Image: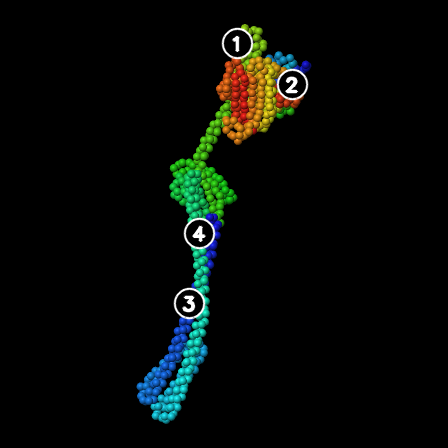
């Protein structure tokens, strides 16, 4: 489909989740380059370093030590050179409060962590495809919740 | 009787009094004048008779003197000269008396003329006596006596004339007074009658006023007495402050509220402040200052320390009133202790409740995140194993794996449903006017896969727009229709009918106690396996299930959530079922 690999970044403190994420992208046919950061502070350091390549899609866990996902989201959307990055919230929580808040702060997709590996693969594939096909601003509230 | 008419009647009585007083003065002045003229006329009568008497006296004395002269001439005895001399003196005295009595000018003049004649007569008599003593010519004596006789006749005639004049004078005066006398008594009598009428009228008027005052007074007494009692019942007291005289009055019950005997100390602001809790004194004095500087009536809340050490919570409130002559400040002091204590208790309970809500929310957090986290991993690892490593596992192992998987799935359902149930809390949700057709559409979309799988047919009539929590009503539809799809008869495609009616106000079912509210009745019926009517209430209880887990899986929470949602909307839900025929769930939502 495409030549250049899509740059994927996951900010996630849980080792098992990082494992599932990595395995899922291994199985997906699309060419991707997946990298990880362990918490919010690490994420912000990575993004603000001039040497590092910026991701096309950032998957952001909400519940992280030191700096949580929502704080990161707010900071990223405030920075001019980062605010164009597509951000997918990737969380266990399905509370309306979290969904509403992240949407207001400018997140593009809200993914509730699925409990089935096959479903996880489907969702991630979809997200990557959707992101490739649309401009980030074209997403609306209906496509916002990919899984519940 | 109003206060105004009492004042009016008092004015009337004052007028009557003034009129009556002036009448009395008038009558008494007239009477005084009348008596005066009466006494005057009787004075005239006495005067006239005195003058007449003196005139007769003069005549009598002259005759006495003549008799004395005659006796001397005949006898030449000097004894006869004695009455002659005394008569001369007495006539002179009578002359002086007449002079003092005669007020009339004419009579005065006559008197002088009379005295000249009398003097002439005496001269003649003296001359006769001299002649008689000298033994002179008899002819001269006779001539002189004759002249004396002539003068005497003249005097008699003159005295008679004076006498007549006096009588006519008297009659004239008498007539003058007679005229006044006949007129005066009648007018006095008329005035008396008039005064009497006024007096009688005033008497009745005063009696009437007195009666209404009495009635007014007794009414006031009743009000006063009931005021006293209502003060005790209502736990309030009254202070009356005269701003002119600076005098303060407290009602009996105010003393009782302060824990003192009625009127046991002098009501002053200083004495009152002694009862006020030291920390609250400033709030009260600031309120009082505001009252005077801005004329603004304020409410003050403060504590009172009773003599026995008890703390009471008071509220003071007042108003200025003026009754014309003086300006008063009426203060109502209410004992709010019971209310305040229960309010404080309620506040504490409220605080506890808030605390427990916060705890519940954090439990929700734990359940939604921390409890799901390990479960999700278990499930993901199971799915990883079954996808990647199934070929390496023995048949028994595969069976165990599927047992683990179904247990984990069941745990997931339980956690999700429990979460949903605990989130069905109305306090954070907003009621908005929402079209129920839209919510039903959303619900059917959520169930679309299920509907498609079961080949279900759904008929729905037009639904209203109501004030609801939108996602809860959507959940309600999902749960009830989801149940209808789940409990269908094997092999027969489910048919679900959704109907809606607006109930007339007087036709609400018996369980709707608020008969004045309008309700919409939404019924969802299916052709599934139904249930025995005896379970119609039990199925709404949390974790209550009618079927075995392996027959129809479920947590037993779905309908409990439905009941909670409907209750959040102040509605009702009932279930009717016939085994083998179908079930109908009816929701009543207020319009």
Whether residue A91 is visible, yes or no, is: no
Q: Is residue B121 above or below residue B255?
A: below
Q: Nearer the viewer, residue A143 or B200?
A: B200
Q: Nearer the observer, disc 1 or disc 3? A: 3
Numbered label attached to residue A130: 2
Q: Nearer the observer, disc 2 or disc 4? A: 4
From the top left corner, tell me how far across and down residue A10 is, in percent: 60, 18
Q: Is residue B162 above or below residue B575?
A: below
Whether residue B5 is visible, yes or no, is: yes
Q: Nearer the observer, disc 4 or disc 3? A: 4
For the residues beneath circles 2 and 4, the answer to whether they share a chain is: no
For the residues beneath circles 1 and 4, the answer to whether they share a chain is: yes
Residue at horizontal 60 percent and vertical 19 percent from the top: B458
Numbered label attached to residue B35: 3
Q: Nearer the N terminus, badge 1 or badge 3?
A: 3
Q: Nearer the N terminus, badge 4 or badge 3?
A: 3
Q: Nearer the N terminus, badge 1 or badge 4?
A: 4
The residue beneath circle 1 is B400
Q: Nearer the observer, disc 3 or disc 2? A: 3
Which chain does the residue under circle 1 lie in?
B
The CA span between labels 2 and 1 is 38 Å
Q: Nearer the viewer, residue B561 or B50?
A: B50
The CA span between labels 2 and 4 is 103 Å
- Which part of the image, by quadrant, shows the N terminus of chain A? top right
Q: Is residue B210 above or below residue B119?
A: above
Residue at horizontal 48 percent and vertical 50 percent from the top: B5
For the residues labelled 1 and 3, say whether their Cβ atoms are less than 8 Å apart. Answer: no
- Which part of the image, by quadrant, shows the C terminus of chain A? top right
The residue beneath circle 4 is B208
Which chain does the residue under circle 4 lie in?
B
Q: Residues within 10 Å of mark 1 (few under 14, many from 20)?
A: few
Image quadrant in which you'd find residue B158: bottom left
């Amino acid at each position: 489909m495409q030549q250049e690999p899509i740059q994927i970044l996951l900010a996630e403190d849980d080792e098992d989740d990082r494992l599932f994420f990595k395995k899922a992208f291994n199985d997906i046919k699309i060419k991707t380059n997946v990298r990880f950061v362990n918490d919010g502070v690490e994420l912000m350091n990575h993004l603000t370093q001039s040497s590092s390549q910026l991701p096309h899609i950032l998957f952001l866990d909400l519940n992280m030590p030191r700096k949580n996902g929502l704080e990161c989201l707010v900071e990223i959307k405030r920075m001019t050179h980062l605010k164009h990055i597509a951000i997918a919230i990737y969380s266990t929580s399905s509370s309306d409060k979290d969904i509403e808040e992240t949407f207001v702060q400018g997140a593009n997709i809200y993914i509730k962590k699925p409990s089935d590996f096959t479903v996880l693969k489907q969702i991630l594939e979809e997200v990557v495809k959707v992101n490739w096909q649309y401009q980030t601003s074209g997403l609306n509230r209906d496509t916002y919740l990919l899984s519940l | 009787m109003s206060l105004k008419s009492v004042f009016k009647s008092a004015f009337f009585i004052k007028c009557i009094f003034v009129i009556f007083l002036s009448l009395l003065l008038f009558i008494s002045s007239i009477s005084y004048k009348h008596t005066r003229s009466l006494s005057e006329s009787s004075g005239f009568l006495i005067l006239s008779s005195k003058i007449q008497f003196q005139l007769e006296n003069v005549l009598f004395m002259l005759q006495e003197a003549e008799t004395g002269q005659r006796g001397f001439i005949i006898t030449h005895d000097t004894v006869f000269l004695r009455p002659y001399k005394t008569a001369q003196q007495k006539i002179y005295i009578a002359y002086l008396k007449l002079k003092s009595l005669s007020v009339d000018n004419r009579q005065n003049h006559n008197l002088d003329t009379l005295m000249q004649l009398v003097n002439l007569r005496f001269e003649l008599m003296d001359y006769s006596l001299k002649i008689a003593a000298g033994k002179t010519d008899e002819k001269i004596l006779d001539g002189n006596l004759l002249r004396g006789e002539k003068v005497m006749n003249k005097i008699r005639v003159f005295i008679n004339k004076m006498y007549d004049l006096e009588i006519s004078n008297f009659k004239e005066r008498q007539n003058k007074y007679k005229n006044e006398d006949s007129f005066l008594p009648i007018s006095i009598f008329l005035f008396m009658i008039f005064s009497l009428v006024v007096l009688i009228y005033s008497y009745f008027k005063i009696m009437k006023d007195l009666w209404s005052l009495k009635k007014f007074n007794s009414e006031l007494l009743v009000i006063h007495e009931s005021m006293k009692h209502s003060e005790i019942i209502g736990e309030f007291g009254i202070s009356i402050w005269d701003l002119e005289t600076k005098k303060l009055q407290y009602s009996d019950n105010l003393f009782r509220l302060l824990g003192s005997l009625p009127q046991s100390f002098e009501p002053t602001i200083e004495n009152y402040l002694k009862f006020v809790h030291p920390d609250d004194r400033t709030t009260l004095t600031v309120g009082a200052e505001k009252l005077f500087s801005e004329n603004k009536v304020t409410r003050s809340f403060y504590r009172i320390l009773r003599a026995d050490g008890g703390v009471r919570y008071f509220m003071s409130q007042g108003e200025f009133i003026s009754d014309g002559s003086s300006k008063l400040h009426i203060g109502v002091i209410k004992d709010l202790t019971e209310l305040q204590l229960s309010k404080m208790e309620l506040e504490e309970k409220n605080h506890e409740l808030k605390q427990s809500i916060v705890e519940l929310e954090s439990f929700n957090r734990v359940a939604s995140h921390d409890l799901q986290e390990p479960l999700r991993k278990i499930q993901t690892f199971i799915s990883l194993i079954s996808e990647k490593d199934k070929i390496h596992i023995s048949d028994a192992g595969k069976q165990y794996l599927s047992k683990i998987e179904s247990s984990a799935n069941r745990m997931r359902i339980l956690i999700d449903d429990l979460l949903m149930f605990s989130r069905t809390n109305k306090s954070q949700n907003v009621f908005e006017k929402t079209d129920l057709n839209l919510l039903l559409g959303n619900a059917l979309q959520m169930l679309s896969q299920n509907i498609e799988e079961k080949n279900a047919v759904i008929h729905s009539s037009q639904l209203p727009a109501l004030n609801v929590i939108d996602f809860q009503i959507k959940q309600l539809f999902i749960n009830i229709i989801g149940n209808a799809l789940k409990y269908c008869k094997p092999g027969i495609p489910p048919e679900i009918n959704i109907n809606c009616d607006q109930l007339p106000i007087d036709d609400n079912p018996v369980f709707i106690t608020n008969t004045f509210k309008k309700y919409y009745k939404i019924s969802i019926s299916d052709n599934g396996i139904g249930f025995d009517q005896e379970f119609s209430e039990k199925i709404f209880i949390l974790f209550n299930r009618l079927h075995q887990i392996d027959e129809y899986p479920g947590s037993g929470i779905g309908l409990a959530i439905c009941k909670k949602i409907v209750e959040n909307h102040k509605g009702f839900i009932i279930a009717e079922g016939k085994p083998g025929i179908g079930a109908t769930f009816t929701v009543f939502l207020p319009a």
